[in-house]
Image (cartoon, rainbow, N blue to C red):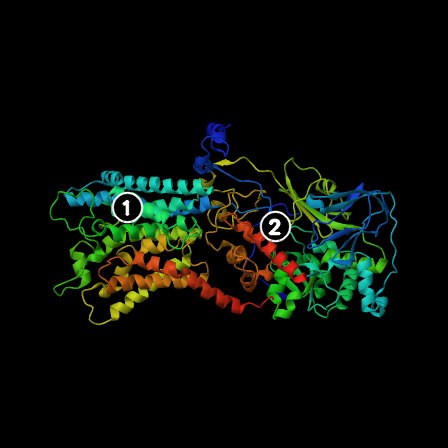
Amino acid sequence: METLAPSKGFKLKLAGKPDTSVIRLARPATVGVSAQDIPHIRPKLLVKEKEAVKTGTPLFCDKREPAIQYVSPGTGTVKQIRFGARRRLLEVVIALDSMDDFVEFDPVSSPDLVKLPDQELIDRLKQGGVWQSLRQLPARDTADSATAPPLIIVCLNGNDLFSPHPGRVLEDNIPRFEFGLAVLKRFCDRIVVAARTSSMEQLNPVRHLITHQVSDSYPAWDPGAILYHIKEKAEENTAWYIHVQDLLHLARFLQTGRYPVETMVTVTRGEDKKPHMIARRGAPIRLLAGNFPAGSLITTGRFNGRKVDPDTHLGFFETTLNILPDTPEDEMFGFLRPGLNKPTVSRTFLSCLIDREVQLDGTLHGEERACINCSYCEDICPVDLMPSFIMKALHGDDIEEALELGLLDCCRCGLCSFTCPSKIELSQILSRGMDTHHKDKQG
Amino acid sequence: MNPIKKIFDLLEYDFSDAGKFAKLGPLFDATKTFFFLPSPKTRLGPFIRDHLDLKRYMSVVLLSLMPVLFFGMYNTGYQSGLARGESLDFWSAFLSGAWVVLPIIIVSYAVGLFWEILFAAIRRHPISEGFLVTGMLFPLTLPPTIPLWQVALGISFGVVIGKEIFGGTGRNILNPALTARAFVFFSYPVTMSGNVWVAGASGVDGITGATALAVTADGGSSLTATLADQGFTLPHLFFGLVPGSIGETSALCCLIGAAILMITRIGNYRIILGGIAGLILTALLTWLLPGTYGTWADAGPIYHLCAGGFLFGISFMATDPVSAPGTNPGRWIFGFLIGFLTVILRVANPAFAEGVMLAILFMNVFAPLLDHLVMKHRISKRIPNV
């Protein structure tokens, strides 16, 4: 096992780490399939409102490649198709029946897997609605099945600091995990399995399968950050990655021939220590979040998730909810206070002298100003970018210079925006630059 | 509800776009956010943000300036007492110094703020906190005898030509406070040098208030001996009880300020340490040169460090992040070359007794070039992604 210990990243200790016990949530009345957490998708609806669907019935596909389908995680009727501004698809909501009726595929056992031809395997995964859990760097688009990847990264930890613990996710699923790795081996010989140091203790049963142990400061376990630290040549940039739960779903789908309907989710709020929850995929946010104060900000990852409306449903890739408290009133002489309770990665508040768990609310703590070249973004960037210089290149429409400076290595962790004293939305500016570049390349 | 908050809420409408004082909106906004730190909700990810903002950032710089400011006030009073032949106790020296220094600072802030508001109102953007520092730095680089109208003219030049015509804080290529000082220095050389640097000494004969850097030895004695003759012993230079510009005389207070900046990481330690290293090495080199006996080339690194405004400049002026390079290797080189140029200017060009101001301004111009070279190097090290 190799150890990757990049020196940069987010080093504050946040409060609210979930408890490692596991509970099972009640069956929800509705489930949803969100199109908002799927990068680059141009959804095309395949169902109408009031239509009956089985578990595994395709609800919408990606217009760019119609074989990529997003299927219903439950049996029932399409209750509502919600659109946002400019008729952008937000989510398809299914009212659940009491019993599940599955779209059935032939189960694939380990010996079958060897015999299954490549193309058939790929088609099966696409029909089953699980292929898209394989993502391709650097744009994080759906993996392109036409070209073999240079390597596949299996991420045992999720996008947030408090995503489900891989020890809990894997504990009853080790054979399935091995089966999943065998499936990935069909596409590529080089499989990287990476876990955070703090997760290792509970991963002893799969220790022999883990190839890289990464440092415990966010976002060291992000696939983009892992790739940046292990890659040796430019060809490796197009690596694929998959998160552990998605790999288990993929394996379960092949083994049972049925679309997997349950997933493990964590919910964090303030200093709560909520247990891990096994919930229906696409469960309603309200069911997962439980009680929370009015005005709270709910996100699916405090750094790189999206803001969710409590009346919607959890997305395809999402496994965690952070509930951030409401803004307190503007503080009198806020910038002159010693700041014992103001967590910061800088050293400008006394809080930096105290080593304790901290809480951060969902506000900017200041106003946007021009970039003053302070390099705080560079000092924290896990992939050694100079975000402020890339931002300036992008503002000047100089995509070439931005790419030269390593724009596509950006792992969208959001730390540059987090730390910027001028409150510039660096992460958004860089993401937009990458997305535009990806779109242009696709033609 | 907080009574001050109530006043702001009452006035809010008049200063909004629809109100009668719409043009003064930025002033209202700046005053309001001074009292109440705004913290709007995050709209885009990441949804949590660090507590450090530009107000705090600039406040730390002001905090680091407090030792030189207070010492400068005391020293101004002390020197003027000395010139009049009175010996003042601490408080009367401090108060008489403050009586001289405060008007300069008030004029600097008031006139500079006028320009800031004017540009902010025309451009409809909020007033940037960077001015808090410029408005304080500029007076500290001036001799206490400066006429107030020159202060007003200088800060106007610094803010308008040094900063606002480039687009405001964050877009200037030169340090605005130093631009202002350079303007006054070249426009009114009589008030910026010579024998009139002691406040409140007019009408007293026989006062030679020349700064240490204007001293050269003649008649075979060494420079250090001549300096000591004129009251510039090393301890005096280090603690700062010598005539000079308000903020620059005390090496000790500058070092305290530099330490605050480096510990809080608001000032980049690479610039400060690089600058000191550059100065020491260059001063050692000129010290080893033959035939320089009795000039500043012969002074050695310690005297170069303590005399003049080098420590003030490298700690507070060169560390201005906007006009310094944005890359770490660039910062080392930038600092080092400032130290180098300071000694070279002091030694080779007696017309400009103080070299640090010109060295920093010169290197400000080269900062983008340093960044460019460093970035080219870094790009060549990266595994390309396209």
Q: Is residue A255 above or below residue B34?
A: below
Res. B67 visible in picture: no
Residue B368 in percent (x, y) is at: 43, 60
Q: Is residue B263 left or right of residue A99?
A: left
Q: Which mark is residue A262?
A: none
Residue A430 in percent (x, y) is at: 58, 55
In this figure, which residue is indicated by the disc labeled 1? B72
Circle 1 residues within 10 Å: few <14, some 14–19, many ≥20: many
Q: Chain of mark 1?
A: B
Where is the N terminus of chain A found, in terms of image quarters?
bottom right
Where is the C terminus of chain A found, in terms of image quarters?
bottom right
Foreground residue among A109 and A441: A441
Amino acid at circle 1:
Gly
Classify residue A361 by image quadrant. top right
Q: Secondary structure at mark 1?
A: helix
Q: Is residue A396 above or below residue A359?
A: below
Residue A156 in percent (x, y) is at: 69, 58
In this figure, which residue is indicated by the disc labeled 2? A303
Q: Chain of mark 2?
A: A
The residue under the point 22% across, 59% down is B351
Amino acid at circle 2:
Phe
Q: Is residue B100 left or right of residue A171?
A: left
Q: Secondary structure at mark 2?
A: loop
